[in-house]
Amino acid sequence: MSRKTVWIAGGLILAIGVLGYLSYHQEPAMKDAAGTLVTAPSVHRADMRNWLADGERGLWIQGGNAEWFYARFSPACHGLNSTNSLVFDTGSSGNIDRTSSVVLPGGGRCPMHTFAPSDGPSKNRNDNVVQEPQTQ
């Protein structure tokens, strides 16, 4: 093979690789009520400020701009309500979205079923909890 053929073949292989990467890593597109394309909601893992479990079926996640999102799991994420440590598996994008998973300390993996903007956890969610003094 000539040197020119090698360069052309290398360039084609590189171009195909770049096109494949870009087509695989596109943001999922959604349509709003007016039919306009909008990007799917997400929070970059470096911008996440807080999270709070909603039993074993869901998780509230607060972004860096104080915006809340709600992630629903299907099936239930057993052990979510009794842990204070999570790992978010976001893949190479670094964005927490509906394609992400939560990994629990015991190794359990819970894929997100939905991920949507939310008002956040209810302000009165602990109203029925009876405060008791701590005993030593």
Image (tube, helix red, strand yellow):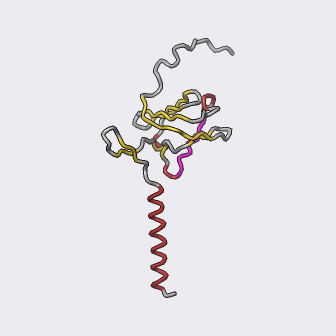
Say which residue appears at 67% left-offset and 41% top-offset: 107
Q: Left or right: where does residue 35 sit relative to residue 54?
A: left
Q: Position of residue 131 (x, y in %)?
A: 58, 12
Q: Quadrant of residue 103?
A: top right
Q: Position of residue 82 (x, y in %)?
A: 63, 28
Q: Which residues are magenta?
A: 84-91
**Magenta span includes 100:** no
Q: Left or right: where does residue 97 sit relative to residue 80?
A: left
In the depicted structure, whether residue 119 falls above or below residue 99: above
Say which residue appears at 57% left-offset and 41% top-offset: 111
Say which residue appears at 53% left-offset and 17% top-offset: 126
Q: Left or right: where does residue 58 sit relative to residue 12?
A: right
> Which quadrant would the C terminus be assigned to in this image?
top right
Q: How many marks?
A: 0
Q: Quadrant of residue 40?
A: top left
Farthest residue toward the bottom? 2
In the depicted structure, whether residue 59 falls above or below residue 1: above
Say which residue appears at 48% left-offset and 76% top-offset: 10
**Magenta span includes 88:** yes
Q: Position of residue 87 (x, y in %)?
A: 58, 41
Between 46 and 25, the one nearer to me in the picture: 25
